Image (spheres, rainbow, N blue to C red):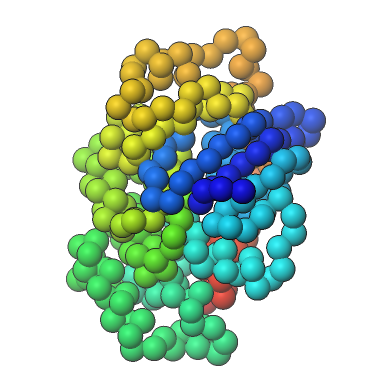
Amino acid sequence: MNGCIDLRGVRCTLAGRTVLDIDRLVVEEGERVGIVGHNGAGKSTLLRVLSGFTRPTAGQVSVLGLRLDTPLPPARLRALRCEAGQVLQGLHLVPRLSALENVLIGCLGRVTGWRSWVRRYPAHECERACAALATVGMLDKASMRTDGLSGGERQKIAIARLLVQAPRLILADEPTAALDPAAAQEICRVLGTAAGEATRVSVVHNTALLPLLADRVIGLRQGRIVFDLAQSQVDEAQLAALYRSGPADEACERSDDPLASLPRSPDEIESRRWRRHACTHTAAPAGHSPWH
C-alpha cells in the first residue's frame, strides 16, 4: 500500500447502518487535507479509523506504513501513538495540572516507566516544552492550572503539547470548535506553525477556515466521498450542495457516534461523558495515564 494514508474498500457499519464507505483514499506525506460534510457524514468515524480506535468492518487501512484493519501488537500500536498526534474538540487536557505539565504529556512516548508516573521529566524535555509554550505565546502561563485558562488558551496548550510530541501525522477534529472567528483564525495559524512538515488531516466545521487549514478538500456525504479537490477549486456552490439536506439524508443528520442512539436520562448522559473521557484519554501519547 502507498502513501502516508492508504484506504482501500473501507466500510464501517454501526447498528446495521453504513457510516463510512470509501473505495480508495490516498494521502501523501506532507499533505494538508480538510474533511467537510454535515453532521453524521462520517468525518469523525474516518478520523477514528485513521487513529486506530475504530477498526473497519471491511477493507484495508494503512497509516504510516502500519496496517490498522488487523490487530496490532502493543509495541507497534505504541509506535503509531507516538507518530500520530491528535487535536480533538475536547482537547483532553488534565484540568488540575499546570499548562507546562500538560504540554510535557506530549513527550510520554519517549519518557516511560517511573518517570512518567511521578512526572519527573528530563531537563531537555522541560526545555522543549517551554520552547513549545513560547511558540504559541503561552510561556507566561506555564505555571497556571489549565482549568483557569480561557478556551483559546487551552487550545494553544493542546497545540504546544503536539509540538512536543512532534508527530509525523496530525489528526485534528474541528480544532476551532466553540471559538469566536478571530480566535479561530489565530488557532489555525498556530496549528500551521506546529504542524511544520507533518501530514495533516483536519475535520473542518467552518468552511471559511479551509484556506488556513488545507490545500486539499474532501467532501463526505453519507459516509462517501462526494468530491476530492484542491482547496482553490472548491467553490460555494459545491459546499452548498454538499450540506444541502433532503429526505434521503435524514438518517445521516444524527451523529456517527454509536453512543448517540442511547437513552438520554441524566444518569445516562453522565455515563456517556465518563465513557468518552476514559476512551479519549487513551488517545494521548503512549504512556500517559489520565490519573496523572
Task: State the image coordinates of residue 153 (x, y, percent, origin top left).
Answer: 29, 57
Position of 13 compared to 140: left or right? right
Look at the picture and state if 292 lies above or below 20: below
Task: State the image coordinates of residue 156 (x, y, percent, origin top left).
Answer: 31, 58
Task: State the image coordinates of residue 71 (x, y, percent, origin top left).
Answer: 74, 59
Which residue is at the far top? 247
Name which residue lies at 34% across and 37% down.
215
Residue 39 visible, this orientation: yes
Residue 213 falls in image quadrant = top left
Position of 209 compared to 204: left or right? left
Name which residue lies at 29% across and 46% down.
188
Look at the picture and state if 172 lies above or below 222: below
Look at the picture and state if 234 lies above or below 11: above
The residue nearer to you, when weighing 118 against 59, is: 59
Task: State the image coordinates of residue 135 (x, y, percent, origin top left).
Answer: 22, 64
Residue 104 falls in image quadrant = bottom left
Name which residue lies at 67% across and 54% down.
68
Residue 146 visible, this orientation: no
Look at the picture and state if 179 lies above or below 220: below
Position of 206 compared to 116: left or right? left
